[in-house]
């Protein structure tokens, strides 16, 4: 298990809600940075999206197969982690920096193999709204799932994180199917 | 009979899991049938799902 944020469950009641709001807002900031990069790249590359759709389709299908573990490889992503030493900046600033790093989705351990398919799907999307939906959907999911263990009772925060992760792990099948079908759709649109 | 106590967090996680599954079950065929018109919903749901999968990486 990768440790949860130090002091994550500190405070109670409205203070805890305040911390979560700050974290959620920071995740949105991090996701916005990625959205800006993707949209800027998409604008620059807008002349010919067809070849990219083929690549995005193939990668999406491949990552779907990885998600359902038909291709048994483990994609870790970045080995960098948010340094715990950053807690010296204080709890609020630390949570905000942590949230921004989590919001980018790529600075730390990967949430899912599906993240490898995100750039291709975003860059070959038909509309900018598709990119926005994809990126901010990620921000919402990441914030919500970080909040759930804080409201679970009867165990330590680390155990609650593990139980939550075990529950949502079943979703990898749906994600895998979604990625495969999106890949097929992307290939179909490229024809 | 065993009585299992469920916390609010577990209920929320279960609700999230089943609702996301439901969204996919209903919207996924639309990707193929509508030729990308529903892509914004599907991509948004995919982003949500990928974010949710980050439960342990936090």
Image (tube, rainbow, N blue to C red):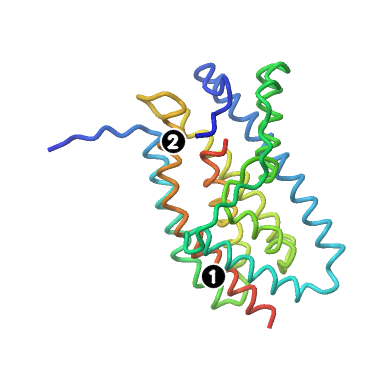
| N-terminal-most mark, 1 or 2 | 2
x%, y% of residue B30?
53, 72
Give the numbered dot on residue A181: 1
Farthest residue in the front direction? A73
Per the image, the residue denoted by label 2 is A162
x%, y% of residue A135?
67, 51
- Mark 2: few/some/many CA within 10 Å (<14, 14-19, 20+): some
Residue located 69% across and 20% down the image: A85
Q: Secondary structure at mark 2?
A: helix
Kindly identify which chain the residue marked by label 1 belongs to: A
Give the numbered dot on residue A134: none
x%, y% of residue A43?
84, 62
Quarter of the view holding residue A58: bottom right
Locate residue A88 relative to residue A72 in the image: left or right. right
Quarter of the view holding residue B37: bottom right
Locate residue A103 relative to residue A13 in the image: left or right. right
Q: Is residue A184 above or below residue A151?
A: below
Considering depth in this image, is B27 or B47 the residue closer to the camera?
Answer: B47
Q: Considering the image in quadrants, where does the C terminus of chain A appear?
A: bottom right
x%, y% of residue A130?
68, 61
Give the distance between the C-alpha atoms of the residues marked 1 and 2, in whole angstroms: 29 Å
Q: Is residue A151 above or below residue B22?
A: above
Q: Secondary structure at mark 1?
A: helix
- Mark 1: few/some/many CA within 10 Å (<14, 14-19, 20+): many
Residue located 70% across and 54% down the image: A132
């Amino acid at each position: 298990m990768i440790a949860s944020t130090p002091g994550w469950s500190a405070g109670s009641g409205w203070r805890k809600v305040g911390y979560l709001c700050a974290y959620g807002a920071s995740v949105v900031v991090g996701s916005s940075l990625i959205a800006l990069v993707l949209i800027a790249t998409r604008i620059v590359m807008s002349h010919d999206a067809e070849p990219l759709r083929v690549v995005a389709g193939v990668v999406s299908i491949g990552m779907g197969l990885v998600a359902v573990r038909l291709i048994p490889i483990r994609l870790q992503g970045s080995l960098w982690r948010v340094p715990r030493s950053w807690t010296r900046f204080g709890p609020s600033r630390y949570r905000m920096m942590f949230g921004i790093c989590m919001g980018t989705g790529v600075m730390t351990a990967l949430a899912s193999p599906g993240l490898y398919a995100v750039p291709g799907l975003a860059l070959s999307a038909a509309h900018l709204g598709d990119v926005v939906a994809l990126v901010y959907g990620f921000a919402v999911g990441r914030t919500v799932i970080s909040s759930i263990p804080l409201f679970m009772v009867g165990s330590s925060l680390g155990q609650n994180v593990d139980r939550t992760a075990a529950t949502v792990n079943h979703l990898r099948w749906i994600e895998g199917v979604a990625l495969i079908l999106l890949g097929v759709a992307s290939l179909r649109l490229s024809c | 009979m065993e009585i299992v106590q469920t916390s609010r967090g577990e209920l929320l996680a279960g609700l999230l899991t089943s609702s996301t599954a439901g969204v996919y079950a209903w919207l996924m065929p639309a990707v193929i049938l509508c030729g990308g018109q529903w892509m914004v919903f599907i991509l948004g749901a995919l982003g949500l799902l990928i974010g949710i999968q980050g439960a342990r990486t936090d």
